[in-house]
Amino acid sequence: MTAVDARFAGGSIIIDQGHATYDPTTKLVTINAPDWDAALFPHEARQLAAALTAAAAEAERRTA
């Protein structure tokens, strides 16, 4: 489990691992944030991480 402090999101975002309710062998990455949550397949979580990393890099370039 990893907690990310995100003050503008209303509190911490918790990233953890879980499994699908219909099949315990189907592994998922779970995101629990204030007022929303999501479950992603591992490849989707990697794509989201890459998109967030790219967006953060672009935001830093724009403010530098």
Image: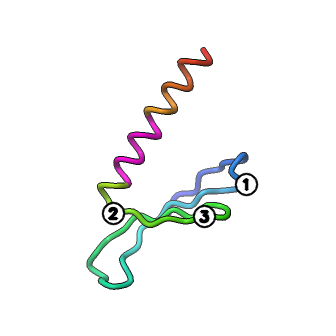
| Badge 3 or badge 1: first in the primary sequence | 1
Secondary structure character of the magenta stretch overall: helix
Q: Magenta segment: does it hold 50?
A: yes
Q: Which residues are magenta?
A: 45-53
Distance between mark 1 and mark 2 Cα atoms: 25 Å
- Quickly name the residue at label 2: 41
Q: How crowded is the residue under tag 1: few (<14 C-alpha within 10 Å), some, or many (20+)?
A: few
Q: Position of residue 58 (x, y in %)?
A: 50, 25
Instruction: Indicate whether 53 appears above or below 57.
Output: below
- Quickly name the residue at label 3: 36
Q: How crowded is the residue under tag 3: few (<14 C-alpha within 10 Å), some, or many (20+)?
A: few
- Quickly name the residue at label 1: 10
Question: What residue sits 66% from the left and 48% below the top?
Answer: 6
Q: Residue flagged by tag 3: what amino acid is it?
A: Trp
| Badge 2 or badge 3: first in the primary sequence | 3
The secondary element bearing badge 3 is classed as strand
Distance between mark 2 and mark 3 Cα atoms: 17 Å
Question: What residue sits 49% from the left and 33% below the top?
Answer: 55
Dot in front, 3 or 1: 3
| Badge 1 or badge 2: first in the primary sequence | 1
